[in-house]
Amino acid sequence: MALRNIIKNGDERLRKKARAVTDFNERLWTLLDDMYETMQDGDGVGLAATQVGILRRAVVIDIGEGLIEFINPVITESSGDQYGSEGCMSVPGEYGMVHRPQKVVVQAQDRHGKPFELTAEDYLAVAVCHETDHLDGVLFIDKTDHMLTPEELGE
Ligand code: GNR
Ligand code: NI
């Protein structure tokens, strides 16, 4: 396993739409392992392949309930609304308030290509939406209605 470099806001690759994963091979598994290590090293709760410069539709999420890998994720249902602060490892040191669905249903494949469906609520739903946005070149700073000042962060 190895740490990968996280690309930062301003790098045009963050704005590209990632392509579907088609090959569920050793190369994908190494990427996923490296993404998990890189996410943990940075105390993140999720990471999209785009953030390590790989424009493929792969995401890892661990909000403290264990690792979930999503290959080619698609949100098929969303409902409700929640409003909370978000940060991003590609936008270091900046935080903003974002509206997200309270609940999403996501269809994806695992690292072997096996399809699964997951219902995510609350913070897990936020993470799923934040990461699937990355795969479409979207950052939380595009969706925030209110960036947080250092004073607000300290409160
Ligand atoms: O580590 C992260 N924290 C976070 C907090 C609130 C909402 C979303 C996130 S995701 C972020 C890691 C990251 O940049 N993933 O793409
Ligand atoms: Ni992010």
Image (spheres, rainbow, N blue to C red):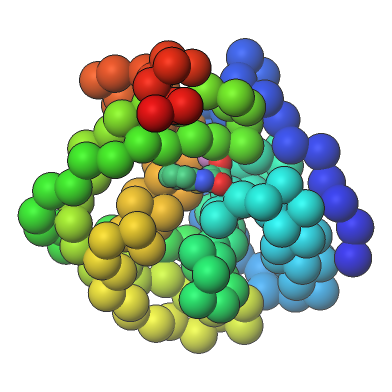
Q: Position of residue 43 (x, y in %)?
A: 67, 51
56 shown above or below 30: above
Q: Residue furthest left?
A: 80
User: How many marks can you see?
Assistant: 0
In which image quadrant can residue 78 be found? bottom left
Q: Where is residue 88 in the image (x, y as percent from the top left)?
A: 54, 36
140 shown above or below 45: above
Task: In this rendered view, identify the residue nearer to me: 94 or 54.
Answer: 94
Q: Position of residue 139 (x, y in %)?
A: 44, 30
> Which residue is located at x 63 percent, y 27 percent?
92
Q: Residue furthest front?
A: 155
Relative placement, left or right, of 24 versus 121 is: right
Relative placement, left or right, of 155 versus 9 is: left
In which image quadrant can residue 153 be found? top left
> Which residue is located at x 55 percent, y 56 percent?
45
| Quadrant of the drawing holding the N terminus | bottom right
Task: In this rendered view, identify the residue nearer to me: 110 or 104.
Answer: 104
